[in-house]
Amino acid sequence: MVDSGAPTEGSQAPEFTAPLATPDGSVSEVSLSSLRSDGAVLLVFQPTDFDVGSFAERHALGEYDWFTADDRLRVVGVNRARPRTNREFADYLEVTYPFCSDRDLSIADAYGVTYRAFGVARRARPACFFVDREGTIRYRWVGDRNRSGRVRPRISDLYEVVMDVLGRPETESFGFA
């Protein structure tokens, strides 16, 4: 895959402000810095709602849900749809993370993940960026727009980077020492 022009690991994540639709139905305007105020952020770019072409892509979006179990990390989907459609999409995929609406693809442009489908329609490639609390990109994966490559990152690689940055959580003993 040719480099997409996306920001590199170790660089500062581009700031943005966008409507965020949560699975509970609320919508609010958020910025990347406000999302980072609670910890690290995993941005998951999806080309468009209800256009998940294969089971592998649907499965990939669901895999990011595993990261929501860690309170130190916030998973946020990003796509072109309106907030209402994003809520329906999250419900359809049964994911628990919210989605930012990037109607004009300005967020996707800033992260270097846009392309022209069939040379005409602008779209965002599947991609994910792990941004630490200070705003540094610690992991990036950008999908191949020709879909000849992987439709998702290796979740185990992403997990290792997240654990290296955040540290491994203490294991629960459930009262047994």
Image: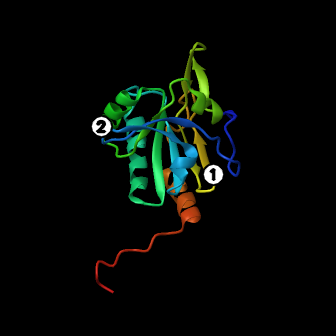
Residue drawn 54% across and 64% down?
166
Amino acid beneath label 2:
Asp
Q: What crowding class fits label 2: few (fewer than 14 Cα within 10 Å), some (14-19), or many (20 or more)?
A: some
Q: Which residue is mark 2?
A: 91
Secondary structure found at label 2: helix
Q: Which residue is mark 1?
A: 135
The residue at the far front in this view is 29
Whole-percent x and y of residue 88? 31, 31
Going from N to C along the chain, the mark reached first, 2 or 1, is 2
For residue 10, above or below residue 151: below
| The C terminus, quarter of image | bottom left
Q: Quadrant of residue 146?
A: top right
Q: Nearer the viewer, mark 2 or mark 1?
A: 1
For residue 159, above or below residue 33: below
Whole-percent x and y of residue 172? 35, 75
Q: Is residue 53 visible?
A: no
Whole-percent x and y of residue 76? 46, 44
Q: Quadrant of residue 109?
A: top right
Q: Which mark, by number, is residue 167?
A: none
Residue drawn 29% across and 77% down?
174
Real-space Cα separation, disc 2 to disc 1, in angstroms: 29 Å
Secondary structure found at label 1: loop
Left or right of 13 in this view: 172: left
